[in-house]
Amino acid sequence: MNQNRICYLLGIRYPVVQAPMNWVSGAALAAAVSEAGGMGTLGPNAGAKTIEPDPEKTAETMREQIKKVRSLTDKPFAVNVVVGFGEDVKYSQKIVEVLTEEKVPAAIVSVGRPDTYTETLKNAGIKVMHAISTARHAQKAQQAGVDAVICEGYEAGGHKGFTELTTFVLTPLVADAVDIPVVTGGGIGDARGVLAALALGADGIYMGSRFMATQESDSHDNVKQAVVRAKDACTISLDKQFMIARDLNNTFADQFRQMRKSGASAEELGKYLDEHGQYHAQHLGRADDAEICCGQVAGMINDTPPAGELLGSIIADLENRFAELEKQVRQITGST
């Protein structure tokens, strides 16, 4: 049996957790990653065709996706629960009901307090991984009883808090602060990133943007090709007032940045985001004038392979990368 703490906890072969991505990570991607030995994850809008305002319908769409994953693989998988605030909590409440009824193996809980659903989920036999952004948050999550914490460095794509801790710093801070398993992400797209994360104290890695550019991803092909074409410093962090988002640097990002600079009102910015949000890029294919949440690792992505093939190649390359690192350490220390 695999004695890696995350593998043991989740019942998976490799310590690779596919990060949930809005409008991107549906049943096909989650099943492919799980079948290949990692932990596939259904995103909050998995399987959705439109922006659905009804919490009941949103939850039932998730139920359908859970059943579809189970029709494609018998391996463990996770579902993202976005806790939310205020009125938005009504969505997560319905999602949690579905998760407990369907007895999914694991939940990745984000954007909210760690004590909101942890007890409910664990009582249903569901493993709980909570997303945090600081070592202090990790300690609170551990106190709330979560099974593992997930930390993402500032390099990561999507929506984050206002802290600017990079993966290189955040990972050891969190690993030193808690006793439970730590999964880390942000800037990881190949075996070098996996090895670095493990060296920093993580038990597993959290990878999103690289899986977005795979064949099973629900991301529109226009978006996948935009990511493949992107090179070097191709992403930007946008301050949305309520949260920071890292996006592919396109016309949308430039226009939003100019609106903020010129003093656009919160209403104007909100309207622009509604009309150019992730749905318009990821689902409708407006890859230039709509938002593409994407990590800095986009500059390293050059193809769109099958997700299982990608995961397999990363794992296969780990031993070679470790051997190279071991050789360098011996040269430095003078050991034989």
Image (tube, rainbow, N blue to C red):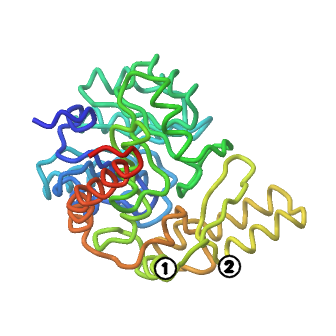
Dot 2 alpha-carbon crowd within 10 angstroms: few under 14, some 14 to 19, many 20 or more: some
Select label 2 or label 1 by which is in front: 2
* Residue 65 image-quadrant placement: bottom left
Q: Residue furthest top?
A: 143
Residue at which label 2 appears:
251
- Does residue 155 appear to the left or right of 238 in the view shown? left
* Residue 102 image-quadrant placement: top left
Q: Which amino acid does label 1 sit on?
A: Gly
**Residue placed at 40% from the left, 80% from the top?**
221
On screen, 303 above or below 141?
A: below
Circles 2, 1 touching at the beta carbon (< 8 Å): no
In the depicted view, which residue is nearer to us: 25 or 102? 25
| SS for dot 1 | loop
On screen, 165 above or below 316?
A: above
Q: Residue furthest right?
A: 263
In x, y percent, where is residue 3? 18, 33
**Residue placed at 45% from the left, 71% from the top?**
300
| SS for dot 2 | helix
Residue 42 visible to the viewer: no
Residue 238 visible to the viewer: yes
Residue at which label 1 appears:
285
Q: What residue type is labelled 2?
A: Thr
In x, y percent, where is residue 148? 37, 30
- Does residue 26 appear to the left or right of 228 in the view shown? left
The numbered mark at residue 96 is none
